[in-house]
Image: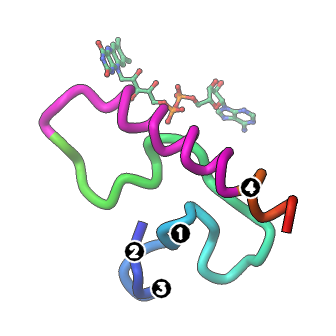
Amino acid sequence: MSKDPRDGVVNADCRLHDVANLYVAGSAVFPTGGQANPMLPAVALALRLSAHLAQTRRA
Ligand SMILES: Cc1cc2nc3c(=O)[nH]c(=O)nc-3n(C[C@H](O)[C@H](O)[C@H](O)COP(=O)(O)OP(=O)(O)OC[C@H]3O[C@@H](n4cnc5c(N)ncnc54)[C@H](O)[C@@H]3O)c2cc1C
């Protein structure tokens, strides 16, 4: 995940920088490898993405 497409694959909404309708849900979006257990952050990001998609669809 990155602001700048040169630094990563997805933006802060977990959407591919270069593809308008393709999102990634999972620990693959972590910008770095952490030292703590990764599962709950991955679940939190997936929930945040589902809320974003629901809001986008409503709009
Ligand atoms: C032995 C072990 C113990 C762990 N213990 C902990 C722990 O105690 N606490 C913790 O926080 N984390 C733990 N983790 C890490 C945690 O499991 C992962 O961080 C988490 O599962 C990552 O979720 P994910 O959705 O990114 O990937 P995954 O859970 O790996 O999900 C990826 C999914 O994509 C599917 N898939 C792959 N390729 C394809 C394809 N071509 N087409 C369709 N589907 C595909 C796979 O079958 C899988 O279901 C552990 C990991 C392991 C291996």
Q: Residue at x 63, y 67 (%)?
A: 15
Q: Which residue is mark 2?
A: 2
Alpha-carbon neighbours of circle 3 within 10 Å: few (<14), some, or many (≥20)? Answer: few
**Circle count:** 4
What is the secondary structure assignment of the residue under circle 4?
helix
Of the two numbered discs 3 and 4 in the rendering, the one whose residue sits closer to the viewer: 4
Q: Residue at x 42, y 66 (%)?
A: 1
Residue 52: give x, y in percent of width and height.
Answer: 66, 56
Are the residues flagged by discs 2 and 3 in contact, CB closer than 8 Å?
Answer: yes
The residue pinned by badge 3 equals 5
Distance between mark 3 and mark 1 Cα atoms? 8 Å
Would you say 52 lies left or right of 10 here? right
**Relative depth, front residue between 59 and 38:** 59
SS label for mark 3: loop
Residue 46 lies within the magenta run = yes
Q: Which mark is residue 53?
A: 4
| Left or right placement of residue 57 versus residue 18 in this view | right
Boundaries of the magenta span:
35-52
Q: Picture coordinates of residue 43 (x, y %)?
A: 48, 32
Q: Disc 1, disc 2: CB below 8 Å?
A: yes
Crowding at dot 1, Cα within 10 Å, few <14 / some 14-19 / many 20+, comes out as many
In the picture of the structure, the residue carrying the numbered disc 1 is 10
Q: What residue lies at 67% left-to-right and 83% top-to-bottom? A: 18
Q: Do callouts 4 and 1 mark residues in contact (Cβ within 8 Å)? A: no
